[in-house]
Amino acid sequence: MVELKVNGAVRQVDAAPETPLLYVLREDLQLNGAKFGCGLGQCGACTVAIDGAPAFSCLLPVGLLAGREITTVEGLGSPDKPGPLQQAFIDEQAAQCGYCIAGMVMRAHTLLARNPSPTDDEILEHMSPNLCRCGAHMRIVAAIRRASSRKEASRSQRGAL
Amino acid sequence: MTLPDCPALTRRAALAGAGALVVSFSLARSAFAQDQVQPPQNIGREPKSPAPLPGSLKVDPNLDAWIRIGSDDSITLFTGKAELGQGIKTALLQIAAEQLDVDMGRITLVTADTARTVNEGFTAGSHSMQDSGTAILHASAQVREMLLQLASARFAVAAQDLKAQDGKVVAPDGQSVRYGELVVGSELHIPATPNSRLKPLDQRRIMGKPVRRVDIPNKVAGGPAYVQDLRLPGMVHGRVVRPPSPGAKLEAVDAGAVERMPGVLKVARDGDWLAVIAEKEWQAVTAMRALAAATRWSQPTALPEKTRIFETLAGLKADTTTINQKQAPPAAAVHTIEAEYRRNYQLHGSIGPSCAVAQMQDGALTLWTHAQGMFPLRKAVAEMLSLPEDKVRCIHVEGSGCYGHNGADDAAADAALLARAMPGRPVRIQYMREDEHRFEPYGPVMTSRGAVALDGSGRIVDWRYEVRSNTHSTRPPGAGQLLSAQMLEKAFQPGPPQPLPQPEGGGDRNAIPLYDFPSQSIVHHFVPEMPLRVSAMRGLGAYHNVFAIESLMDEAAAAAREDPVAFRLKHLKDARGRDVVQKAAEAFGWSANATRESGRGRGFAFARYKNLGAYAAVAMEVSVDRETGGVRLLRAVAAVDSGEAVNPDGIRNQIEGGIIQSASWSLYEEVQYEPRRILSRDWSTYPILRFPALPRRVEVHIIDRPGQPFLGTGEATQGPAAAAIGNAIADAVGVRCRELPMTAARIKGLIGG
Amino acid sequence: MRFGHLVTLLIVVALVGFGLTFLQSRPLKPVDPPRRQSFDDAQVRRGATLAAIGDCASCHTAPNGPAYAGGVALETPFGVIHGTNITPDPDTGIGRWSFAAFERAMREGTDQAGNRLYPAFPYNHFAKLTDDDLKALYAFVMTRQPVRAQTPENRLRFPYSIRGLVTFWNWLYLDDKPFKPDPRQSDEWSRGAYLVEALAHCGACHTPRTKWGGENSKARFDGGDAEGWWAPPLNGSTPALEPWDAERLTAYLRSWDDRHGGAVGPMAAVTANLAKAPDADVKAIAVYIASHFGQPDVGKKVRLEVLLSRPEPDLGDDAGLARGRDVFKGVCAQCHETGAQVPFTVQNLAQHTSLFAPTPDNVLRVALHGIRTPAGGFGPIMPGFAGSLTPQQLGDLARYLRARFTDLPPWPDPTAAARRLMNQPEGPAPAPAVAPKAWATAQ
């Protein structure tokens, strides 16, 4: 049994300690947000926040996470009551297939928590570990900008960096 | 997740569940009709139905194959197409809601499912709106008319005095009747007619509006959205052990230790197909790795030498067809331009490796998959498992975007084989990253040669173009098209590769320019033998052909010393084509005598996808580092005409995404291989575009054509974006890169010291 | 204390020096920027090769900036120095430099106006270049795209901000005797020696510096520092066990060696540039450097064999090591020890030089911030674990790596090092794009 703190709740999980967090989130805790993409830390589809920092859940065994605060995209809101960053993604329609999006939201979340008004270059650099294949990048950046406290952030900026 | 159907249900029960109205008629249709039905258009054969019905109504004209209304007022809409992330669900709901006069939220949409929907073939080739959207547009309008007729009888009021409104028919005196009250029996089981009374354009309130996509909230907030998210009771996890290289034979495996690993339920082997099933997913991954380490494989036949691939392609036997010819009296050519263009193998590279869930119960298989064609897949899987087709049900559930024929069908086949190995329990498989990268069918290597002659007035007087390519579709329905079926003890052989015929074409898609040249000859050299396994990738041959044609147009414009945009317009009569060219040029701020900073360039390109679908023009600005050959995208401006725009934001999203994806293909992407193995097995060995490489701006201008037919849009900018980048590079540094991808190394090689 | 005395001495010397004209040289006459046609194409191409071997771009091209337009900030013990704009822009670059001015800068470290250049610019090496090579380099830089870009002001502490003082440094460290081949050595070796000493300036990072910032000639190639990274020794004094020979060095300098891996950090740019150099030159460099490593030491060979063949060491009841093992098995082993054949991982970490370093900094930097290849490049991607692992976990990991893959004593307090490095704002370590074919051959 491993004890994990996920989205504010302490969860007991019957998993071997070397199991990567991703598999525990998806299988044992039935959370859909974090996705398997590469298992190598190259694409960011599995991104979650650990104590507020972005992490590749495919490469982090649960045995190392005692006492850490794990936040998944489910911790930011729900489809019915999306959180502000999720709402920004909806407002910008920042997805196509959407497989990468939960990871994008989580990586962006860790940026905005640390730096509420990042510049475009800071957004691009911060988001660099995460891959999108559909080409929804411009909208993803627009959503992050919209959720930031930058004054000029507005829908009219979509498509522009 | 809400399942399209729970696995215990049989097909018959599933159909019964859809409403009493349906069973007696549509069951019969389903049982007998599918073998005879040809999927519309996109596998290249003419539909057999003689009636000139719009879109996929040709496949099944019965209105209740598309729309059903329950006595509880529930409205169910059926499409044989699937959501691939292109937003098709939302657009189809918009159409139906508009024509039926109900809120979108009132309609339940059922997508491709062999037990429930029409066989619309593959969701591919930018056909969904043209085929299914058109069918639903007309079916919905005709259902509304029928509801008005039924209410007219009930109220004894003339139909034209009645109004459909929010799920009810309202009479002038205020009395109303709900749709569910009007449809009590088999009223909707009637064939559609060729003409519909569509809702007048000025009364539309949902079509043509940038409606928010219905699937996005789940995707941003962790709601169930993908086949990867399916969790069925008792579900177990499978993984396959792929050979080190395509074609290697499994000589020995020592599975003993793996079988004793925690959670492992079974090691399954059939010929060269090797897999493991475990209770939990990570156990399956760990066991698969251990199993891989316990195998011995034969040396496979050598893969081609990458540095010689174009010679290899040139040396393979080809079937040559002249697909288009136009003769004019010979004119005096002042300039002649000849050039060869090349494209390397590229991969689809879904962010989520392919996944499927299958369950074998009482001799029948249910398969949840994100493949693009449920009916062809059913046929292939049934053949592979020696099951009658009616014992296999394929249900589409969304996956990661596929951009064509990727590993989805193969993963479905693996799930089916795993389910056969463990009857009763649902088995889920998701490929590992290297399984997807190394074994998906690639976008084919291609070459083309163009020879363009210009007269003294700078007009093209003769255009010769020859394209050489493998097939662009090795999709099911043959079991031999499934990778794992080729590896079984009783191996299935892939059928002989076939070219996809014109007018849509495969390798020769968009090989015929839309420009008006007095004399032209277009030749397709179809090469059956495949050095590497290939299949459909977004845009098929159009990506390469438009890149080549539009690069040649710039080469010709330069020879004629004319502005590239003016030069295109001079050769283009098609009015809608001219409109998008002019719109993109104007929005970009294109002017013939713009001065530019050194190292910066701008490029323009245009095409009408397949010469049948959406029109798209792209203008691009880049900067090129002369020292490294590295290209930086600065901005892109596109203009697109998709006919009537059902969801403008959906179109915009597709075009933006197409430009960014094509930029990634065109600047970075090529599969790496050497005779012993495929080297591209992850994102470090197959790099794609990341955020810092984005252009500063991508603008999309839609030319809406209300009332005009829908034109497929999803693949419209793959070719134009590539060519616009190539043209911008040439403008920036004066070198013409004729090989895709236009890597920094290739460009630096052309620039020289 | 001693430092204080030195400063005082310097100030005195400086005050005296101000009166003396030799601190400054006479300006040279500006010329009109030479036209491209005035250079021979072959000469320009040769210059391009030499510039690649000389790694000019590393200091003279800002990240994502235009080539050779300067602006790179170099952190030195004396303050921040900026790489200058060496494009032929007449106002902000060297467009008005005659060949004589270029030659004086390269050989004497004095710019056209007569100002002393700081020896972060390795003119002490370039002084040995042949006239022909200097001319080729001049032809190359003068035919680059001119870029208007003002180089930012240096931020050096007093008294180092007085350029004239470099005159004294030159007395100590500038050896402008021309390169003389060693007749006992092969032509290849001599070519390598010339390229390394006169152009590639390997010693600038791989030789320790004196307190005055000069290369310590008594400890040539004994290992040094590069932007805070440990630059390992290039001779027999290396603590690492996996031997280097000319062939492996060539593979490494070209892109990737299956035992030693590939370059990361400041070395990435060097190998990325060498990828543009002719095979023969890279091989010559490798032959010369390999001769400094000498024949593999038998003792080291035996130690390496033991390390490669030994089972997991007994960790005893050391809880920290056990925790480190859990981190390694759970995180690192996904790529570095699974048989998953993940590209760009070495066969066995006991072969990797960084684990034998005097400090865990190189290893921790990579573990914390990861590795990144330039956009579109075929090459390693490693995620950083700065946020997801704690300093304690990273420290434990470093201890375990050292205990498992080396036979050297533990690093002192790697957890403190992890904490220190974690707080440094730093991006992923750069790695060069690799030629796929070369990489496949090296496997």
Image (cartoon, rainbow, N blue to C red):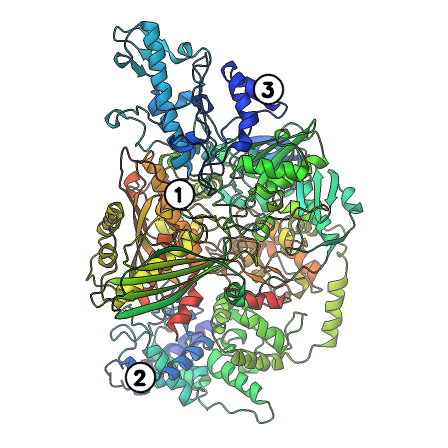
In the image, residue B56 above or below residue B680 = above
Q: Chain of mark 1?
A: B
Q: Chain of mark 2?
A: C
Give the Cα distance between marks 2 and 1.
Answer: 67 Å
Identify the secondary structure beneath mark 2. loop
Whether residue B623 is visible to the viewer of this picture, yes or no, is: no
Give how far across and how far down residue B45 sits, in percent.
47, 41
Q: Chain of mark 3?
A: B
For label 2, the residue is C24
Task: Identify the image quadrant of the C terminus of chain B.
Answer: bottom left
Give the Cα distance between marks 1 and 3.
Answer: 36 Å
Amino acid marked by disc 2: Gln
In the shown orientation, is residue C266 left or right of residue A18? left
Q: Give A83 or B569, whichever is nearer the viewer.
A: B569
Task: Identify the image quadrant of the N terminus of chain B.
Answer: top right
Identify the secondary structure beneath mark 3. helix
Packing grade of label 3 (10 A; few <14, some 14-19, many >=20) is few
Do residues under tags 2 and 3 come within 8 Å of each other at their CB atoms? no
Q: Nearer the viewer, mark 2 or mark 3?
A: 3
For label 3, the residue is B13
Is disc 2 in the same subunit as disc 3? no
Q: Which mark is residue B714?
A: 1
Give how far across and how far down residue C29 sits, in percent.
24, 85
Which residue shows up at 28% across the image and 32% down it?
B707
Identify the secondary structure beneath mark 1. loop
In the image, residue B549 above or below residue B99 = below
Give how far across and how far down residue B243 sits, in percent.
67, 53
Give the Cα distance between marks 2 and 3.
Answer: 96 Å
